[in-house]
Amino acid sequence: LTNKKIVMKWRHRNWPEEHYATVALNFVPAPGQTELQLDCKGVPVCKEEGMKFCWQKQHFEEIKGLLQLTTLNG
């Protein structure tokens, strides 16, 4: 959905090459901001905690830092 949701196939580099999860990034309007929600299906059960850590550290914190820089420099 334009400006609302991104859906993609995603895999961690340590997963078997043929295994992908389906990731949906939902953009939810909130007063003065936008909330980003992650929905992920197809992650191997034994990899769930690692996947959560990966998205938090390697994606969301990076995005947050870039947005803060944009605000400071804007």
Image: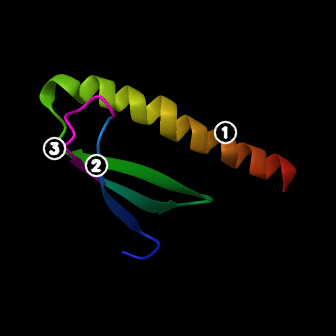
Q: Which mark is residue 65?
A: 1
Q: Are marks 3 and 2 in contact (CB under 8 Å)?
A: no
Left or right, 3 with respect to 15, comes to right
How many neighbours does mark 2 have within 10 angstroms: few (below 14), some (14-19), or many (20 or more)? few
Q: Which of pointers 2 and 1 lies earlier in the amino acid sequence?
A: 2
Name the element at disc 2. strand
How far apart marks 1 and 3 lie (CA) works out to: 29 Å
How far apart marks 2 and 1 lie (CA) works out to: 22 Å
How many numbered dots are placed on residues in this image? 3
Instruction: Please name the colour scheme applied to the rendered image.
Output: rainbow
Name the element at disc 3. loop
Q: Are marks 1 and 3 in contact (CB under 8 Å)?
A: no
Q: Residue furthest right?
A: 73
Q: Is 20 situated above or below 4? A: above
Left or right, 67 with respect to 69, comes to left
Under mark 1, the amino acid is: Gly
Q: Position of residue 29 (x, y in %)?
A: 49, 63
Q: Which mark is residue 39?
A: 2
Under mark 2, the amino acid is: Asp
Q: Which of pointers 1 and 3 lies earlier in the amino acid sequence?
A: 3
Name the element at disc 1. helix
Q: Is residue 50 magenta?
A: no
Part of the protein shown in magenta: 13-23
Q: Position of residue 53 (x, y in %)?
A: 39, 26
Q: Is residue 22 magenta?
A: yes
Q: Name the chief secondary structure element in magenta.
A: loop
For image coordinates 22% across by 40% down, the residue present is: 17
Q: Residue 43 appears in which quarter of the rendering?
A: top left
Q: Which residue is mark 3?
A: 42
How many neighbours does mark 1 have within 10 angstroms: few (below 14), some (14-19), or many (20 or more)? few
